[in-house]
Amino acid sequence: MTVEPSALRTTGGWAGGHAAHLEQALLQARALIESTVSMHRERQVLPSTVARNNIAQLGAAMEQLIGTARHSVSIALTGLGEFTESALRLLAGSPVRTTVRVLCTADAMQLCADRLRPIPESRLDARVTDRELRRLLVVDGRVALVPAPPHAAEGQFAVVHDTAAVRALELLLAGAWSGSRDLADHLRLSPRLRTELVRNILERLRAGHTDEAAAREINVSLRTYRRYVAEIMRALDASSRFQAGVRAVECGLLSA
């Protein structure tokens, strides 16, 4: 099914003096993302800059938006589902003329790594985060596609054209991007580094405990403790224990 241009086009636009118009657009976008804003207005509002659609139009809407990208495509992905599947299929199958930024949660990272391989590394910046993330697509900083929250009408999504509202959505994505880590680096980390024992060692390295005290606290021999420390530093490509602690946070092995 194709989406008629009118399904993606909104009327009006934000300019100085149109505060009510801007507020309406931001509230609608926030309601879809955060599920916390309800609209209870008794006054007349200007035409909306958020075009709502249903799940049958999702793939076509994403294809149209990505196909018009000139500079950048930024996307946040969580888990599996129609949004993630459509986004990865379109990104991998479309001629890459722009910078592609993908931020995903841990449950989507392997799928992202597999599907994004056709995109040249020079064009792709893929990262993973442990933070709470909302699905979102932003094209050129001028238009965004926002799926509805889980408890909203099934399959609903919105295409947001209002410049200020899109900017607000970009800031939400930038906040999630902060503290994320490179997807390829994350996948290269040995599963051995993700054990409870290694986390305990890393916490003590960060706290500055002596080897003797740390080994005693986690109930291993001093020799075993030092062997683990050497393996951790080698795996994290760290030249000092302090650097190992910093890298552990960057890689999500320790919370900040």
Image (spheres, helix red, strand yellow):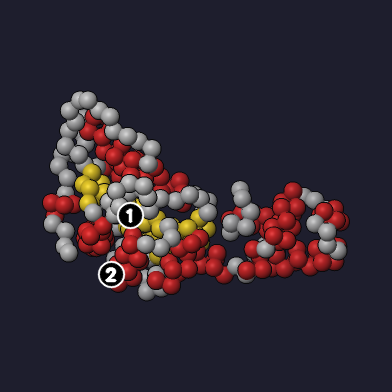
Amino acid residing under circle 2 = Ser
Amino acid residing under circle 1 = Leu
Residue 32 is left or right of residue 215, and the answer is: left
Q: Which mark is residue 78?
A: none
Q: Residues within 10 Å of mark 2 (few under 14, many from 20)?
A: few
Q: Which quadrant would residue 72 be assigned to in this image?
A: bottom left
- Identify the residue at the far bottom of this view: 118
Query: Nearer the observer, disc 2 or disc 1?
Result: 1
- At horizontal 16% and vertical 52% (from top left) the residue drawn is 7
- Identify the residue at the far top of this view: 43
Q: In x, y percent, where is residue 250?
A: 58, 56
Q: Which residue is mark 2?
A: 94
Closer to the camera in the image, 135 or 234: 135
Q: Which residue is mark 1?
A: 137
Residue 129 is left or right of residue 98, and the answer is: right
Closer to the camera in the image, 72 or 151: 151
- At horizontal 37% and vertical 74% (from top left) the residue drawn is 118
Q: In x, y percent, where is residue 234?
A: 69, 68
* Placement of the N terminus among the 4 image quadrants: bottom left
Q: In x, y percent, where is residue 146?
A: 31, 50
Q: Is residue 176 above or below residue 62?
A: above
Q: Are marks 2 and 1 in contact (CB under 8 Å)?
A: no
For marks 2 and 1 on the same chain, the one whose residue lies earlier in the sequence = 2
Q: In what element is the residue under mark 2?
A: loop
Q: Which quadrant would residue 220 be assigned to in this image?
A: bottom right
Q: Residues within 10 Å of mark 1 (few under 14, many from 20)?
A: many
How far, Cα to Cα, is label 2 from label 1? Answer: 16 Å
